[in-house]
Image (cartoon, rainbow, N blue to C red):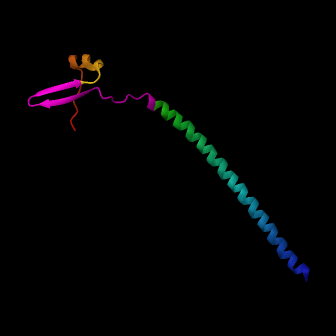
């Protein structure tokens, strides 16, 4: 009689141990996969960040005002006065 219940409980314990082991192995595989992908992502972002640092940013160097028929440019940075005097600038319409 005790043997009748011992076999199903033995099978149940073996099944539970197997499921716990397979789940922990699966979790370790997933964690290692995501760690690998994260390292690849970090390397990729370092490469793109280096490319972005080379881009030239816009900088506010002056203000343009219209007074009746006259246009006045007030410079905040005197380093651009030479290109303005030579006429090296472009106009963008929005």
Foreground pick, 10 / 67: 67
Can you say whether 21 is above or below 93 in the image?
A: below
- The residue lying at 63 percent from left, 45 percent from top is 35
Q: Is residue 9 within the magenta segment?
A: no
Quadrant of the image occupied by residue 81: top left
The picture places residue 75, in percent across and down from the top left corner, at 25, 23
* Left or right of residue 56: residue 39: right
Where is residue 84? Give x, y as percent: 23, 20
Q: Which residues are magenta?
A: 52-74
Report the front residue among 44 and 65.
Answer: 65
Does 19 sit above or below residue 7? above
Q: Quadrant of the C terminus?
A: top left
On screen, residue 20 versus residue 82, left or right, reads right
x 67%, y 47%: residue: 32
In the shown orientation, is residue 32 left or right of residue 11?
Answer: left
Which percent across, then down, holds residue 28? 70, 52
Q: Quadrant of the N terminus?
A: bottom right
What is the x, y in percent for residue 19?
74, 64
């Amino acid at each position: 009689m005790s043997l009748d219940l011992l076999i199903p409980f033995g099978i149940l314990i073996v099944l539970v141990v197997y499921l716990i082991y397979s789940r922990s192995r699966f979790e370790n595989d997933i964690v290692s996969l995501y760690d690998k992908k994260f390292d690849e992502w970090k390397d990729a972002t370092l490469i793109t960040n280096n490319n972005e640092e080379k881009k030239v940013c816009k900088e506010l160097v002056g203000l343009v005002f219209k007074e009746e028929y006259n246009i006045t440019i007030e410079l905040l940075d005197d380093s651009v006065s030479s290109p303005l005097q030579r006429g090296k600038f472009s106009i963008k319409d929005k």
